[in-house]
Amino acid sequence: MVNDPRTLHDRLVAQPRPADLVLAPDGTRLILSVGALDDEGTRYVSELWEVDPTGERDPRPVTGSVQGDSAPVFAADGTLTVLSTRGTDDPPGAGVWTLSANGEAERIAHHPGGTTAFTIAARSRALAYTAGLLPGAADARTHGDLLQQRQRSGVTAILYEATPTRAGGVDLGPAEPHTFVLRGDAPPVDAGGQGLAGTGDMALSADGTAVAYTRAPTSTAPDTNVVVMADAATGVERRTFSRPGHQYYRPVFTADGTLLICQRQREETYDSEWRVTLVAFDVESGEETDLLPDFDNWPWPGRAIPSPVAGDATLWFTGDERGHCPVFRRDPDGTVTRLTASGAYASLCVTPDGATLYALRSTLDSPPQAVRLDAGEPDQDPTLLKTPGDLGPLPGTLTEVHTTADDGFALRAWLILPEDAAPDVPSPSSSRRTADPSPPGPAGHGSGTPGPSWPADTRYSCPTLPCPPDTGNRCRHAAAAGTAAGLTATSSP
């Protein structure tokens, strides 16, 4: 344990950042991506590690993995598949690679300029990936020719004929992300463009016959996006789903392929508040059903996980709740059960029989750690698995505290105290409010380190006052800072 601000800061910067936990189809292997500082200490690079699902063995690097491997996904036959820039001298850019059990790597998909995201069907050889096409390019070959022409001519300009032109602080274009599907030995099929601001948000049905993806909003409808479902073999559009003033995210097919589950986000207006729910589209009729009409919280940020058993309508998801991000289970009759009481969860995985869940759990004082959960037990404590990047104890103590405002509104905070704090040993107080509406700890941003409000100098008591989204934007925690002494400690994560 350290209590020197500079030393603590250095430890936090160097702290590995686990993310992207995936489970093998037979439930025997857990793989995650770990971001670590490069040799120069100037940026983070991804490495793949294997975690023992039983929690008995120490984590180990994946055989054959190299720095830069990321976004692990298991194929139907259990082959580990990743995004990687290895061997990309001709042509440059990331491609999709498989890693055999003995570490042999083979590139199975590539695109001029690189691939940015991919997914694999649960029970077939189908692979969908996102890659760009320049204006005028009909396929990967002509796209590559146009890229070479731009490079030879020294052209770097981008012509925008519509907005948006930037997203996430990055200039968009000139290539538009497209969804490609690769089935067996057939050439890739273009299933359509995602818009300049496309993010690679896509899904394949378990049998690999259908692909779904989101198409980004346009300048004419900036608050509305479109969910596109297409034939995976031909790329022909089958159906689109859209609703004015709403955006859909993270599509996923049910095991039998009859429903497409998405997050639906209602954009805020002067007359309605911002709201998130889960919906199901009937792939034949197009009928849309709200799966959580009476759920008070927001089911995000992660993708919902449907039951792997065909015909079972059970699904699991995460959602903000009073500064935590628990795991919830929705039964076929619509009953919602909270499975965890504390911590922020991400990267949910379910075993083939639907009985056990794996996830990454983080708290304000702990980086993401792989855990095992019972798929149906309410408010359980997770079984912790040995995970790369264990930070160890932090200086000071952390307690969750609660109070009630004059109008009855519940307020909560995290109280951080020095190690030697006691009623007869008072310490100076330094309060701060986290304007960031993410769950406690790194889960909201994938930072892999404790939350941003942990004080570097723990000689001071510090009530950190988050503004959780489930409060409906009624952020009154700032007022509580001045009356922190009135807060009542009720739990500690």
Image (cartoon, rainbow, N blue to C red):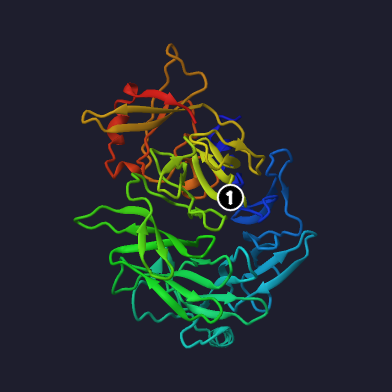
Q: Quadrant of residue 283?
A: bottom left
Vertical order, 244 against 333 (above or below): below
Q: How many marks?
A: 1
The crowding category of the residue bearing disc 1, from other C-alpha atoms within 10 Å (few below 14, some 14 to 19, many at least 20), is many
Q: Residue furthest left?
A: 271
Q: Which residue position holds label 1?
A: 350
Q: Position of residue 288 (x, y in %)?
A: 36, 63
**97 or 449: which is nearer to us?**
97
- Image-based side of 142 in relation to 412, left or right: right
Quadrant of res 149: bottom right
Residue at the extreme top of the image, as rendered: 424
**Is residue 53 rendered to the left or right of residue 286?**
right
Q: Is residue 228 above or below residue 351?
A: below
- Front residue of this view, candidates 326 and 392: 326
Residue 457 horizontal side relative to residue 432, left or right:
right
Residue 286 appearing in the image: yes
Name the residue: 57% across, 55% down: 309
Name which residue lies at 42% across and 17% down: 426
Q: Quadrant of residue 367?
A: top right
Furthest residue toward right: 102
* Quadrant occupied by the N terminus: top right
Residue 135 rendering spot, x and y as whole percentages: 46, 85
The location of residue 61, given as percent across then percent down, is 73, 51
Task: Judge whether 295 appears above or below 484 on screen.
Answer: below
Amino acid tagged 1 = Val
Considering depth in this image, is 427 or 468 the residue closer to the camera? 468
- Using the rendered image of the protein, determine whether residue 39 is visible from the camera's viewpoint: no
* Front residue (pair 109, 77): 77
Residue at x-position 30% and y-position 30%: 480
Q: Secondary structure at mark 1?
A: strand
